[in-house]
Amino acid sequence: MKHLIFITFLCIGIATEAQQVEYKVVTTVESIVPGGIGRSRIISEKDDLNYEDFTTERFDGKKSSQGDIKRKDVKIEKFEETKLLNFFSITGINFQNIASNDALISDKINKTVAEGWELEFVVSGVESDGGKEDGQGIYITRFIFKRNL
């Protein structure tokens, strides 16, 4: 019986050890600016950052030492940038551009999966064109991948 309990705990420990994972985020930014003058990209980081290096704590709810952290120190130097086409051209919405972007994004996903990553989550949001006076807008999607270490 003692051997069975020991083997059970050993198996649980091995399973827990095997479940360590890392995550990777790939972001697409697709412009919805009229006239096709916006910029659209697939972005993937190539540098590692430790979020704790840029994190502070507040103890009284008011005083913050975030001012001690410089934005330039947070920015990474190495990242992958893939050109995408804009949703709009001069004549309006451009379905060929959307299909082309889909092909590029699919290829990025497929190649990332081939590198051993598994697509875990997809999160998207939009800041749309607010009308005649706005002329701004982006559609952003984050693809979150994971893999076992």
Image: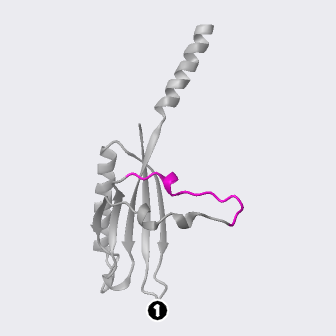
In the image, taking residue 119 as reference, residue 90 lies left or right, namely left
Give the residue pinned by disc 1: 133
Q: Is residue 52 magenta?
A: yes
Q: Quadrant of the C terminus?
A: top left
Q: Is 122 or 21 nearer to us in this picture?
A: 21
Few, some or many residues within 10 Å of mark 1 (<14, 14–19, 20+)? few
In the image, taking residue 57 as reference, residue 106 lies left or right, namely left
Q: Main secondary structure of the magenta part?
A: loop
Q: Quadrant of residue 34?
A: bottom left
> Residue 12: x percent and y percent?
55, 24
For image coordinates 32% across by 74% down, the residue present is 95
* Magenta residues, start to end: 48-62
> Residue 83: x percent and y percent?
27, 68
Q: Is residue 32 above or below residue 19?
A: below
Extreme-right residue of the structure: 60
Q: Quadrant of residue 135?
A: bottom left
> Residue 23: x percent and y percent?
44, 47
Residue 103 visible: no
For image coordinates 55% across by 67% down, the residue present is 67
